[in-house]
Amino acid sequence: MAPTIAAAMGYSQGHLTMTNKLRKPVVEKMRRDRINSSIEQLKTLLRKEFVKQQPDSKLEKADILEMTVCYLRQSASPRPATGNEGYSRCVQEIVHFLSRDEMKTETQRKLLNHFQAAQNSPAHQSPVKEATPVKSALWRPW
């Protein structure tokens, strides 16, 4: 007797299910390998930052990801552009220029005094730049 269509369909679906069951672990391993490779690449790219934060500890994958996110947020956040730096540099140049001549007119002396006072004013001093480290607020259950 010839096999029926229903029997052939049942066989092919069973065969597909078995093939999917065999292929799933292989596909999952490939996915995990891709994730692990990417995490290792992040670790290599940001090695200096990791050493600053946790020099002697073995970093877990979650630590690497969290520190990378913090580093990227810090790098991407726009730094406030202040005109103070340009202003301070300009005042320095003016003071230097006005201080060159030994014989100063009254106007030069007044300008020099004004800009020297402005140079010493805390409102117009350029802020001190400090390298902001990546926050190491790593989540640890222990």
Image (tube, rainbow, N blue to C red):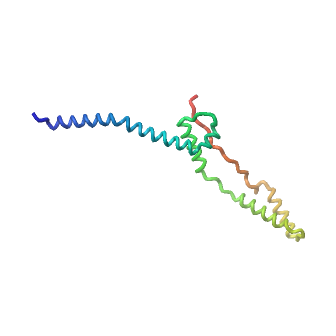
Q: Give the image location of residue 85, x and y in percent.
A: 72, 58
Report whether 50 appears left or right of 112.
left
Residue name at image x 80 percent, y 58 percent: 119
Which quadrant, please, contains the C terminus?
top right
Of the pair 44 and 4, the residue shown nearer to us: 44
Quarter occupied by residue 82: bottom right
Which quadrant, please, contains the N terminus?
top left
Quarter occupied by residue 43: top right
Q: Give the image location of residue 101, x and y in percent.
A: 86, 69
Report whether 37 appears left or right of 57.
left
Quarter occupied by residue 117: bottom right
Residue name at image x 81 percent, y 62 percent: 115
Residue name at image x 49 percent, y 43 percent: 38
Residue name at image x 76 percent, y 55 percent: 125
Query: Does 142 appear above or below 51?
Result: above
Of the pair 117 and 103, the residue shown nearer to us: 103
Query: Does 58 appear above or below 128?
Result: above
Query: Does 140 appear above or below 75?
Result: above
